[in-house]
Image: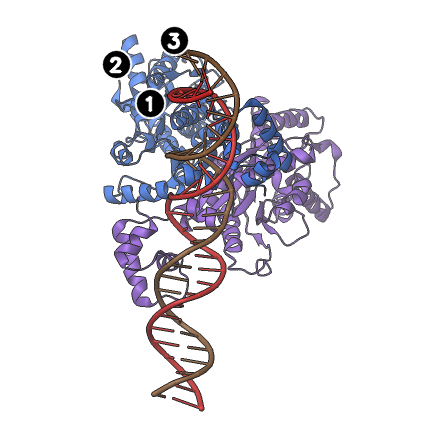
Chain colours: A purple, B blue, C red, D brown
Amino acid sequence: MARMIDVANRAGVSIKTVSRVLNNEPHVKESLRDKVRTAAAEVGYVPSTTARALRSRRSYAIHLVSHSHRSAYVNAIQFGAVQTCQQRGYQLMVSLMEDLRDMPEADLIARFERLMAASKPDGLILVPPLSNDERLYGVLERFDVPVARVGPNNLPDARIIVKINEREAARELTEHLISLGHTRIAFVRGKEDQNATHERFAGYRDALDGAGIALDEALVQPGDFNFPTGLEAGDALFALANRPTAVFAANDDMAAGVLMSAHRLRIDVPDDLSVVGFDDSEIAEKMWPALTTVRQPLLTMGNEATRQLIDAATNQLPGMQDVPNEYLDYEIIHRDSTGPAPRN
Amino acid sequence: MARMIDVANRAGVSIKTVSRVLNNEPHVKESLRDKVRTAAAEVGYVPSTTARALRSRRSYAIHLVSHSHRSAYVNAIQFGAVQTCQQRGYQLMVSLMEDLRDMPEADLIARFERLMAASKPDGLILVPPLSNDERLYGVLERFDVPVARVGPNNLPDARIIVKINEREAARELTEHLISLGHTRIAFVRGKEDQNATHERFAGYRDALDGAGIALDEALVQPGDFNFPTGLEAGDALFALANRPTAVFAANDDMAAGVLMSAHRLRIDVPDDLSVVGFDDSEIAEKMWPALTTVRQPLLTMGNEATRQLIDAATNQLPGMQDVPNEYLDYEIIHRDSTGPAPRN
DNA sequence: ACCGCCGTTGACAGCGTTGTCAATTACTGA
DNA sequence: TCAGTAATTGACAACGCTGTCAACGGCGGT
């Protein structure tokens, strides 16, 4: 495998000059630049990330840390992250972090210390539920590494946060149900320690309030973002004397559970019941009937988080002032699980 | 961040001794070992993977390369891989490789050369369709790196291959349909350049042959492992004058498409039609009706591939003689999409 | 008592790159 | 023309670890 010295010899310059050319540093004559680049191509030179990392204290790697439970959501974000990494010559590493809630802070610190020491990433991507864990907030201060948080997040500072306006999206989706004539609209909550649950519920309430519909606590069911809890929530809702005509599940997996419950009870969707989800995960269009939901630009979110991290690491952006953590665009996807409220 | 020299000073030994202790090398007195370990713990020492990698020419990293299209299948394998990596103190890096078919071999080599040079992995995990691409077979010879291929694979050599017996599984699943009384059993093929398609189809034929059922070419539809082609295949099959009473889709996503087609045509599943898939991907249990399918131990496959790679890199296994590339266990998961053949 | 061996231990070099700084060359203005 | 400054280039060290090899000391055999 060709090293820098081989390129240098072939081009008749010192290795330092080769280094400068390949890193696009100033202070090299154009004529030499070409000569070096040609030589590098001829010997098939590829820089050793390892040596670079050791000397320059930059690893050219981004580390994505996710909770041990893998989902299509995280998968999509990761996909976006690896795309951007490859474009920019970075590596993407992935780690799993088990449940943090019952982990003493000391262990938490130790976990991250090990992770940081071992892979020395130039940036850290945190996805839900890690991204809105307040304790990590303090723990990561200890390490001098840019952190990007993906997903709804109410941390007040200027870190990199990539998200959509979930509250507004939830409101819009609920308003759509209301415009279809629904008034008894149920809501299935997600995990209580995730911000998404609260944002989406807030949007749901906003819409009800706006339409002057009173919140019926009986129509609000707990859940944990997984299919089985969606199923349970559906069973509970449909056992009610006064059934809802529409169900807003806080994510698609739970919406699938609600649909399953409806099917089992021979409730026709969308004629007798409308169901909506959130995320537009890959199962949304594969369900029967295909699910009306909110599309999050997960790929773009992965891209963005990565891009901003790399920029921060490269110091192309002196601070993050010009990255105002704005919302990315979402989109309501209308499919076949929603229809006019049944009259009765 | 503590370095080895800090541990050495604290323990009153040379850094070489620290290195020996922490790498479990021989020739250190037990008393010193304890002293070093204590010192390491006290200063919170974590070895620098970077420095280690540079000097020892081992990166303590496994690289998982997948096709640009990310699926739940790959996601699960990756999950298994990262689990084992973390257990063994390795990092997992991921890469995407775009479509290789129309890539000249020279480019292919260049792609891998860059990948290898940049991340210098101790092992490479290839997932379908990369894992059964014959050209990679030759290309990877150039690099002195252990390669694990996940998925059905008929390469004749002694490399690491982690798979289930897909043909047998497909036969068993088809036999189950036959035992339910079905004789008009359709098959939806996957991508033709993937071994899985051929293995699964072969198993389907085995079962038909075994039962003395003639293969009806009209019941064999093309597909590409994605939902839309499953939908198309369903539409084509259900437009037939003599409809099948059962459909075996070569994977779950296509089975979802077949189900959607059936629902749209108001064909009752499982009363009028049985549908089965393959993989037991996460959507299988969320479909309506929940899908009967073959569970591949994808997590275990990711674990195994990684374990074998690490062992190979560590030379704990001198060769691969004692890793006989045996099949892992699969399991037929009976759900609600299958039932007795309708009488007519 | 001496030799030679083995189990321990450490000094030192070097992995392939980039940072520092000095040396050299080119260019400016008087 | 020449000093003074700026641009260019390279020599060398260093990042933190492991591989090599030499030094040391204890021990058994003669």
Amino acid at pointer 2: Ala
SS assignment at label 3: helix
Residue type, label 1? Phe
- At a point 48% along the width and 51% down the height, the residue shown is A56
Foreground residue among A53 and B132:
A53
From the top left corner, tell me how far across and down residue B226 is, in percent: 39, 33
Residue B214's label in the rendered image is 2
Quadrant where the N terminus of chain A is found in the figure: top left
- Residues at marks 1 and 2, CA–CA distance in whole angstroms: 13 Å
Judging from the image, mark 1 belongs to the subunit labelled: B
Between B4 and B59, the residue placed more toward the observer is: B4
* Nearer-N-terminus badge (3/1): 3
> What amino acid type should be assigned to the residue bearing mark 3?
Ser
Q: How crowded is mark 1: few (under 14 residues within 10 Å), some or many (20 or more)?
A: many
The chain to which mark 3 is attached is B
Residue to which mark 1 is pinned: B187
Query: Which of A242 and B217 lies nearest the eye of the viewer?
Result: B217
Residue topped by disc 3? B179
In this view, A210 is above or below B309: below
